[in-house]
Image (spheres, helix red, strand yellow):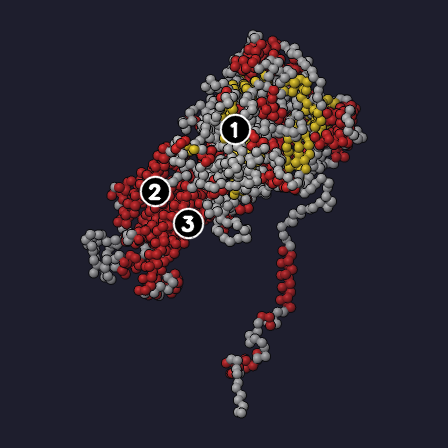
């Protein structure tokens, strides 16, 4: 008998039973891919292949194939890096912080969000590697490895080194957390495969689930580990982008040297991450018919987070402008004057429009509960967040202290190609994930089904 | 006892004792191992052997082995890794500089100035510094040629001699054509040649002719000579379109003198005042205190006005110009210490200048007629009639001695066409070039660094050229060729020079001849004073004024043809060190352009050098199409085009860049006129991007970058800098909470217990010429990256000269202050790694590839660098350079960087400096290799390092002494004294924060606390205080 609360709307609609949950989610994995999936995959792989060619061309010839110059040493590379890392944050926030805050509505979106985190961090990591002049040495010289060069050691003063630790820790914890959650669900697919008599699938998913048996003790340990990992991930949500922001904040470049960067970057990361989660989930929800699991309520909740974080970011922008004026520092003042008025003003105003003005539309309930509006705005927000990083990085260094060295930055096809590569990779990986892994955490969703094994018709859906 | 017999079995098999077990019982292993398998057959052995042999054969196909062959017998004076220095002479046409050549393992790798010469006094120029790479030019001729076919010297000599004798027998006309020849021995050779072939005439011409001046002096003083000028003696300098620091007559010498008269210090709080009247913004005009814009047709009129103002006469035809009356007043006030020069090649104008200088008493003070100079002996009329004769088929034989008139003479095209009618044509250039392409015989001379020669740049100032390397190719001294063709028996030019010197100069010497000769070789120069003579002006000023007044004027545009600060006259255009040297004013590289006033330019948006082409038509000449370069300071209604471009046969580096504009020069009143009136200037819609190393022209009123002062203020003993940054803290309420930024630091600071290297750069004496940039490039193996990469803003120069224009706008108006004034004041700021004591680059490098030395150097460890570029982003001075590509052994950079892409070019590389690989960061090292060499020498000799023993390449090349490098820990060093470094605090003997008491000393971007080891000295302008806007 399903129990319906009079106070709260059910998080999963459609009067789903436990069996329905298993069935609805596992059938994506079990069935053969749809035509749409194949088409999407073909496009993603094509984009990734072109991007991979560009990446190889870069690695073979040198970083000079990008449009960087003596003054602008970082542009699209680090912009993309920060952008992707930022996107990753939503996954961790949803799975860790919302877990700790017992926000049960997160349960049907955390799996996809975490997958997005993993892929986004991989995408992000390609840029610091690709942007190095001598990648073949950079791979290991940034690690404090014992060596025969006496006291030669990585420079612990360098924020880039902090980045190495921050990102690698973040990636490891996120991967383990994500995989841990997948284990019981893999076991469900395995069990169904056994029933269906598909031996190959049964053995593959058995291996993937590490032979999960679902004993009470196992569940208890599983939940403990999940909680511990959530606890570990929580500071990471704040620390990773804080450290990324320190690449800029600890420098002496006007426009980078800003103490508000850590909270501002974290808010921006969550802002863009939620937007990306929305973009992906709105598509997944439609393609895999998961409307009962990812409901308007979920979308509305996420849109509210976007309003909050978008507003924080907006305040940060205005604070920067105010301080640039109030400080009386000529270079700081000019850096922001140049952002607003200079040759890259179009980028600044794109950022302002996309990040500050557009999320405010979500104050209107009609818009924040509209799928189409949410989808469009989620993309707009991520365009805006890309421009934010571009504005911070390029417009600050292209005109800093010494006017004789002021230059412009013009991207080449290889700048664009490397960015496309990460898109191609990201969507290829996400499509593979969506096809072969359960996109919704069945084990958790089952815990929020208000009922037992029988299907009760819901009045709303009658 | 009962006997028990137990059976122990090893395994079930033994117990069972089956047949399989029995079969293998005697073997050690039940299953045979591979080593016991006797299955290997003879065929297997053959297969193995076959594989082995072919594998060994394949393994032999390795990369070719590059051998480094050691000396079997060590040559005397050559110690591997120790350089040798030879005094020699740089001579390129009439351009002269006494030099010292640094030779490593038999290869000249660097040229420095020779301080023993009283002519160049140790100064050099960009062209001189770069010429070492021309020695290793890939387009050099490898040996003699008949037209395009290789030949031997014997065959060539036979052919040329028989032809000459045949022609001489018929009374055929023979001509030797050359640029100005400074060498008395070469002239003696030509004399001998003329004796043998009496129909020979020697014709000299100059790319930048001073024939008008020679004629004017003949009229004024009865002698067709050019006097020596001494700018160092002048308190007031007025120059009418004479670019004496860049291209006029003898810039190396004048730069040295100018540095003396422009220098200010605590002891000498005074300097000369310099007025410049010109159309183009020249490097000379950029250094002037007052610069007025005039059209080229007004040069004469301005001088008439000046003459009237000085002498009180009333010649007609004068025209006023801004500051002209003031200039006249100042000149009169400093009679005897004044100097007026004009750049025009017009006789009348030079007569007028002579009259003015005579009235000012300059002769005998700032102008020395006792020691005339030989830099320009070209005769424009003789050359013009020679070309006419060639065209008319009147010339039978012509020998081009180391000159290229087909390219660099205004009538070059006619000459080239006419050469077909000349039955014997020979060129002795060390490269083929445009003229060589059209002659019958190529008899290549050595490069000057391979050859013996002498020179007499000034009367009784002799100079020796000694080879610094054995000739690389089968070239032969041109003088030897001429002597051979003249049928001389003794043709060794070295012996010839030596015997000449014996007969000319040895007289009255106390040394034996060998010692005398050795001393001359060691010094490179031999100078003796001239008997003082005086001149009196007898020129006809009225006639000159009348000629000037009748000269054509007007038209919408007037044209000035000038030599740019990098390429010069184009003779060394194939040298990438010069192509990639930014022009001191335009900062353009690898490009040819027409300079246009912002008021005339149709190019509204010149951002990032995006521009349009324009068609320029000089009346009666072919139109020329060139991109527009919007040039602040260019007089409205005038345009400027540099010569030296449009080479077609110079080599891979220069061919195809720009247009040859020598053809736009005309012969007017018997001398070449480098200006033209009634020009049609038509901008087109075709777009272009000029490669410039600097595209932002003003310093945005940021006084922490460039500090300036007026001399009238500076003369006041209590003068202090206008900009003293202070930081507000909570700490010191007694000073209003404001403290010097240097006193604040989170860092403990480094300890420099031994040396603490520092540098001072005087903005007042830096004229922006760029010799230091080339010197740095040569010394430190800096890659030249080519036009496309410069457009992408990736030049690799470790040392650059920032050129800033003033703006009319307020410093607070960030939009308008970006726009340069129409006639801006200019400041040059050499900029290199500032070797910060709190270096922002050092903290951000993740792998500690850039670190601080115990002597204050910020050092790069290329091997450790992984190329994140974080350091470059965090460098406030933007002096770090990244190797975007592999610039060596990469066909992509063959044309722009031959010094690292050909075996010949690589000979110029400094073996003490690593050639950097792709993906690493590099920057100025304060010439750490020189510091190290100096320290090692001192250590070997068990003595402390002496101040001045270590010089950086930029310092050594700076003719005006604007760069001073040294140990600021040493209170006796030149830099400590110059900056007045405060004596060390006994409590903190190794403090890094040196306090300077020279009021002009400042550190760039002081307030951000990076604590550089470079100090700049405030630029002082000798302007009157009441000027609101001095340049009009």
- The answer for which chain carries disc 1 is B
Q: State the residue position of label 2.
A: A381
Q: Position of residue B720 (x, y in %)?
A: 48, 26
Q: Is residue A39 visible?
A: no
Q: Is residue B938 left or right of residue B792?
A: right
- Image point (61%, 25%), residue name: B256
Q: Position of residue B409 (x, y in %)?
A: 63, 24
Q: Position of residue A300 (x, y in %)?
A: 27, 47
- The answer for which chain carries disc 2 is A
Q: For the residues tagged 1 and 3, is the chain the same?
A: no
The answer to which quarter of the image holds residue B800 is top right
Q: State the residue position of label 3.
A: A166
Q: State which mark lies toward you, 1 or 3.
A: 1
Q: Is residue A243 left or right of residue B911?
A: left
- Image point (52%, 32%), residue name: B982
Q: Is residue B331 visible?
A: yes
- Image point (60%, 21%), residue name: B231
Tags 1 and 3 touching, CB below 8 Å? no
* Mark number, residue B363: none
Question: What is the CA distance from the residue labelled 2 to the residue labelled 1?
Answer: 56 Å
Q: State which mark lies toward you, 3 or 2.
A: 3
Q: Is residue B528 left or right of residue A75?
A: right
- The answer for which chain carries disc 3 is A
The answer to which quarter of the image holds residue A409 is top left
Q: State the residue position of label 1.
A: B998
* Viewer-nearest residue: B461 or B646: B461
Q: For the residues tagged 3 and 2, is the chain the same?
A: yes
Q: Say which element carries label 3.
A: helix
Q: Say which element carries label 2.
A: helix
The answer to which quarter of the image holds residue B221 is top right
């Amino acid at each position: 008998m399903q129990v319906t609360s009079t106070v709260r709307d059910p998080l999963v609609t459609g009067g789903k039973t436990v069996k329905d949950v298993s069935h609805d989610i596992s059938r994506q994995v079990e069935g053969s891919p749809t035509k749409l999936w194949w088409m999407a995959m073909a496009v993603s792989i094509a984009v990734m292949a072109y991007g991979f060619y560009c990446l190889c061309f870069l690695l073979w010839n040198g970083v000079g194939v990008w449009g960087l110059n003596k003054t602008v040493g970082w542009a699209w590379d680090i912009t993309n890096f920060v952008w992707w890392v930022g996107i990753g944050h939503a996954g961790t926030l949803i799975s860790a912080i919302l877990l700790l805050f017992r926000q049960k509505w997160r349960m049907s979106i955390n799996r996809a969000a975490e997958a997005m985190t993993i892929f986004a961090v991989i995408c992000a990591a390609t840029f610091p590697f690709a942007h190095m002049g001598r990648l073949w040495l950079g791979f290991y010289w940034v690690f404090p490895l014992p060596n025969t060069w006496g006291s030669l050691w990585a420079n612990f003063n360098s924020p880039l080194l902090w980045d190495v630790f921050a990102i690698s820790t973040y990636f490891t914890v996120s991967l383990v957390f994500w995989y841990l959650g997948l284990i019981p669900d893999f076991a469900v697919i395995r069990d169904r495969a056994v029933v269906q008599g598909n031996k190959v699938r049964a053995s593959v998913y058995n291996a993937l689930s590490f032979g999960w048996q679902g004993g009470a003790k196992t569940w208890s340990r599983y939940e403990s580990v999940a909680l511990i990992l959530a606890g570990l991930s929580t500071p990471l949500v704040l620390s990773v982008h804080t450290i990324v922001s320190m690449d800029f904040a600890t420098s002496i470049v006007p426009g980078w040297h800003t103490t508000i960067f850590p909270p501002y970057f974290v808010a921006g990361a969550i802002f863009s991450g939620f937007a990306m989660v929305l973009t992906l989930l709105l598509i997944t929800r439609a393609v895999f018919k998961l409307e009962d699991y990812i409901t308007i309520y979920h979308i509305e909740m996420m849109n509210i987070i976007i309003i909050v974080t978008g507003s924080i970011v907006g305040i940060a922008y205005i604070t920067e402008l105010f301080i640039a004026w109030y400080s009386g520092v000529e270079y700081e003042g000019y850096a922001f004057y140049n952002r607003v008025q200079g040759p890259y003003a179009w980028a600044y105003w794109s950022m302002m429009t996309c990040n500050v003005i557009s999320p405010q539309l979500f104050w209107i309930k009609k818009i924040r509960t509209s799928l189409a509006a949410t989808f469009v705005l989620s993309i707009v927000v991520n365009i805006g967040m890309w421009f934010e990083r571009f504005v911070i990085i390029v417009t600050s260094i292209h005109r800093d202290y010494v006017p004789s060295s002021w230059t412009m930055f013009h991207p080449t096809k290889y700048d664009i190609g490397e960015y496309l590569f990460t898109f191609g990779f990201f969507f290829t990986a996400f499509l593979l994930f969506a096809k072969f892994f359960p996109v919704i955490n069945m084990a958790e969703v089952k815990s929020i089904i208000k009922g037992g094994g029988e299907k009760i018709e819901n009045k709303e859906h009658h | 006892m009962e006997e028990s017999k137990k059976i122990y079995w090893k395994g079930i098999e033994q117990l069972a004792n089956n047949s399989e077990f029995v079969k293998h019982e005697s073997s050690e292993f039940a299953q045979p191992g591979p080593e016991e398998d006797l299955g290997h057959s003879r065929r297997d052995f053959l297969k193995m052997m076959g594989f082995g042999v072919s594998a060994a054969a394949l393994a032999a196909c390795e990369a070719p082995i590059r051998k480094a062959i050691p000396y079997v017998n060590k040559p005397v004076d050559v110690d591997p890794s120790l350089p040798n220095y030879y005094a020699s002479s740089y001579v390129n046409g009439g351009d002269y500089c006494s030099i010292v050549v640094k030779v490593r393992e038999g290869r000249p790798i660097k040229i420095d100035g020779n301080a023993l010469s009283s002519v160049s006094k140790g100064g050099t120029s960009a062209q001189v510094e770069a010429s070492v790479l021309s020695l290793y030019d890939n387009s050099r001729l490898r040996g003699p040629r008949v037209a395009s076919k290789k030949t031997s010297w014997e065959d060539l000599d036979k052919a040329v001699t028989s032809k000459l004798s045949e022609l001489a027998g018929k009374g055929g006309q023979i001509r030797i054509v050359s640029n100005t020849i400074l060498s008395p021995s070469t002239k003696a050779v030509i004399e001998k040649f003329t004796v043998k072939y009496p129909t020979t005439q020697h014709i000299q011409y100059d790319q930048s002719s001073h024939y008008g001046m020679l004629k004017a002096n003949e009229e004024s003083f009865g002698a067709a000579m050019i006097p020596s000028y001494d700018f160092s003696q002048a308190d007031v300098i007025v120059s009418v379109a004479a670019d004496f620091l860049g291209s006029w007559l003898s810039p190396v010498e004048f730069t040295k003198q100018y540095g003396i008269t422009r220098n200010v210090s605590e002891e000498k709080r005074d300097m000369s005042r310099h007025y410049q009247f010109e159309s183009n913004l020249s490097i000379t005009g950029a250094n002037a205190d007052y610069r007025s814009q005039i059209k080229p047709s007004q040069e004469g009129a301005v001088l008439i006005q000046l003459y009237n103002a000085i002498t009180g006469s009333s010649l007609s035809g004068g025209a006023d110009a801004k500051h002209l009356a003031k200039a006249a007043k100042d000149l009169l006030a400093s009679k005897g210490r004044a100097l007026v020069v004009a750049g025009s090649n017009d006789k009348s104008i030079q007569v007028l200048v002579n009259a003015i200088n005579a009235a000012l008493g300059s002769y005998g003070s700032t102008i020395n007629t006792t020691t005339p100079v030989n830099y320009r002996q070209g005769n424009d009329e003789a050359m013009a009639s020679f070309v006419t004769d060639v065209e008319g088929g009147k010339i039978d034989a012509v020998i081009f001695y180391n000159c290229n008139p087909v390219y660099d003479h205004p009538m070059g095209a006619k000459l080239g066409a006419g050469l077909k009618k000349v039955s014997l044509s020979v060129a002795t250039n060390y490269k083929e070039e445009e003229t060589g392409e059209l002659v019958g015989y190529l008899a290549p001379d050595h490069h000057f660094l391979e050859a013996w020669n002498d020179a007499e740049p000034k009367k009784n100032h002799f100079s020796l050229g000694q080879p610094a390397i054995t000739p690389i190719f089968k070239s032969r001294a041109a003088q030897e060729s001429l002597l051979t063709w003249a049928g001389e028996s003794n043709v060794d030019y070295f012996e010839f020079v030596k015997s000449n010197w014996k007969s000319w100069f040895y007289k009255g010497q106390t040394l034996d001849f060998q010692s005398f000769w050795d001393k001359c070789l060691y010094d490179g120069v031999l100078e003796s004073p001239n008997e003082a003579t005086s001149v009196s002006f007898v020129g006809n000023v009225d006639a000159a004024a009348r000629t000037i007044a009748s000269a054509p004027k007007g038209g919408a545009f007037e044209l000035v043809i000038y030599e740019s600060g990098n390429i010069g006259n184009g003779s060394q255009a194939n040298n990438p060190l010069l192509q990639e040297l930014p022009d001191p004013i335009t900062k353009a590289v690898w490009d040819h352009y027409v300079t246009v006033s912002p008021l005339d330019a149709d190019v509204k948006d010149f951002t990032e050098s995006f521009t349009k082409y324009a068609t320029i038509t000089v009346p009666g000449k072919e139109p020329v199409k060139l991109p527009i370069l919007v040039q602040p300071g260019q007089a409205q209604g005038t345009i400027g085009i540099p010569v030296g471009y449009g080479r077609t046969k110079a080599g891979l580096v220069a061919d195809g860049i720009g247009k040859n504009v020598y053809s736009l020069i005309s012969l007017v009143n018997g001398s070449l006129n480098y200006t033209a009136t009634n020009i049609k200037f038509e901008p087109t819609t075709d777009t272009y991007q000029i490669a410039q190393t600097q595209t932002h022209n003003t310093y945005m009123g940021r006084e922490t970058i460039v500090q300036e002062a007026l001399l009238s203020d500076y003369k006041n003993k209590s003068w202090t800098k206008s900009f003293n940054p202070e930081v507000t803290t909570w700490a010191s309420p007694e000073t209003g909470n404001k403290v010097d930024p240097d006193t604040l630091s989170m860092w403990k600071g480094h300890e420099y217990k031994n040396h603490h290297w520092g540098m001072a750069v005087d903005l007042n004496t830096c004229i922006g010429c760029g010799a230091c940039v080339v010197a740095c490039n040569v010394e430190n193996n800096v890659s030249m990256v080519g036009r496309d990469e410069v457009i992408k803003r990736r030049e690799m120069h470790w040392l650059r000269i920032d050129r800033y224009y003033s703006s009319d706008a307020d410093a607070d108006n960030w939009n308008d202050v970006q726009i340069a004034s129409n006639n801006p004041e200019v400041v040059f700021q050499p900029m290199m790694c500032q070797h910060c004591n709190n270096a922002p680059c050092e903290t951000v490098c993740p792998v500690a590839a850039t670190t601080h030395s115990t002597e204050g150097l910020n050092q790069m460890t290329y091997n450790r660098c992984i190329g994140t570029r974080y350091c470059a982003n965090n460098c406030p001075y933007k002096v770090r350079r990244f190797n975007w590509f592999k610039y060596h052994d990469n066909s992509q950079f063959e044309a722009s960087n031959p010094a690292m892409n050909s075996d010949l070019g690589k000979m110029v590389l400094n073996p003490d400096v690593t050639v950097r690989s792709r993906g690493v960061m590099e920057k100025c090292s304060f010439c750490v290799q020189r510091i190290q060499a100096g320290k090692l020498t001192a250590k070997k000799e068990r003595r402390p390092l002496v101040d001045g023993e270590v010089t950086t390449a930029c310092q050594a090349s700076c003719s005006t002494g604007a760069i001073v490098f040294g140990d600021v820990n040493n209170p006796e060093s030149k830099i400590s004294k110059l900056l007045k470094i405060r004596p060390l605090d006994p409590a903190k003997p190794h403090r890094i924060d040196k306090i300077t008491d020279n009021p002009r000393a400042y550190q760039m971007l002081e307030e951000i606390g990076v604590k550089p080891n470079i100090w700049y000295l405030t630029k002082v302008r000798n302007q009157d205080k009441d000027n609101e806007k001095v340049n009009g």
